[in-house]
Image (cartoon, rainbow, N blue to C red):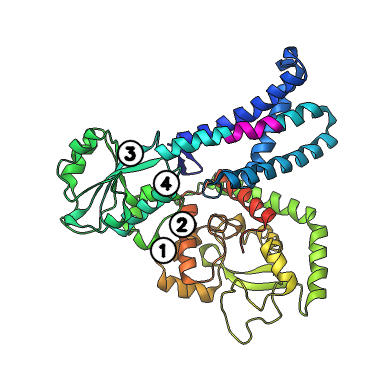
Amino acid sequence: MLRIFKQYYPIRNIFFVIGEFILISASVLLATWIILDNDAIIPSSGLYSKILLITITYQICFYYNDLYDLKITDSYSELSTRLLQSIGAASILLAGVYFAFPQVIIGRNIFIVSVIFAPLLIILWRFFYAIILQKGLFNQKIILLGSSELARDIIKEINEKKDSGYEISIVVEEDGNEFLIPYIDHSKVRHRKKYDGLYDIAKEFNINKIVVAIKQRRGAFPARELLDCRVRGIDIIKGNTFYEMLTGKLIVDQINPDWLIFSRGFRIPRRVRIAKRIIDILVSLVMLIALAPLIALVSLLIKIDSKGPIFFSQERVGEKRNIFKIHKFRSMVENAEKKTGPIWSMDNDDRITRVGRIIRKLRIDEIPQLWNVLKSEMSFVGPRPEREFFVKELEEKIPYYGERFIVKPGITGWAQVSYGYGASVDDAIEKLNYDLFYTKNFSIFMDLMIIARTVKIVLFGKGR
């Protein structure tokens, strides 16, 4: 497994992306060989840098059109449609680059021929990769111990995620329990009710990892069996840690305080905080200047569309529970909570104005918060700030909710790009699962990934 941005990915997934990179490059090389001649394919000609530009543009478009989300592209019709859309978008982007920088043009005929070869090679490559996933080749086999809800959630995640890189070979439930039987495929998974002989079983099935998701009950923990496995070289991992690696989130209602206390993370070095602050200042300044025409246009449209102020300000709870005023473009009618009091907004909330629906969907209503970032009340990336009224309610119902205040709130965050909009306590719990993962595993590189995903959401109007 390879660790990227504090999440673990199967090595084969990295090879999949690299393999596609090679095939796209190969399609351009092949087109060059057909249109020109063998002598054209030499490093000194600058050809390879032009091929790199085309390949990277293709793969960026693939990413933004969800071609690397196997849940979305699970059929060849969907794959073909999105592939053609992505190649069309890449062609338009490259046309713009070629217009601005004619020296990087590779040749019209070469590009057209490569567009013919690239989809064929990519579909063939993905067909080959689908066979690998279907047969479970290169999956890491694991033993799952326990009959807890966490164990059930781990099984569900592995079953639903085709490219998780793991395969549950044996499930051992404590005290003869059969809680997990409905969730396992008995043609592939062996079910046991005893811990004895655990090492011999792992050895027999060539298993090198055991995931422990046992309910916290005295006398039920198989310490002797697990110690025997550990000293003989088998990796033992806690269920919460494994789930975090697998999904990029925690499960707050299944976390014990000792796991949080002894787990790594929740520490942001001073130099990293300074670097984050410098990035926040630079990004917010550049964006406020660059978006000035859009800010003026949206302000005009809001004023024309409905009565009331252009901007909406509201008190929120920030880092270390400091209260500050957040600023947004007004997307609801004036005094929207006059009759109802503080309530979460819904998907089809009739308080939202016509312009408000558009700017909320495209996240344009968040632009004024760049001013909050400049004032150091917020960061560009972090957990979304909540109102004090809801914070008090949520802290009573959700364990560890207060831990999200150890970092500055953000305009966008890991919860927003991973889960989207929510308007209930259940949604708040799920968002906290992602927020805690972010605060526990914070890094500048993770911020950059969140920003990239946010751009994707804004461009395609996903999210709220």
Marks 2 and 3: in contact by CB < 8 Å? Answer: no
Specify which label sits upstream in the sequence, 3 or 1.
3
User: On residue 245, which mark appears?
Assistant: 4
Q: Which residue is mark 1?
A: 400
Residue drawn where x is 59% and y is 73% of the image: 346
Marks 1 and 2: in contact by CB < 8 Å? Answer: yes
Asked if 329 appears above or below 243 in the picture, the reply is: below
Q: Nearer the viewer, residue 121 or 235?
A: 121
Image quarter of the N terminus? top left
| Residue type marked 3 | Lys
Q: Position of residue 206 (x, y in %)?
A: 27, 33
Q: Which residue is mark 2?
A: 436
Q: Nearer the viewer, residue 9 or 181?
A: 181
**Front: mark 3 or 2:** 3
| Residue type marked 1 | Tyr
Whether the magenta-drawn stretch holds residue 184 is answered as no
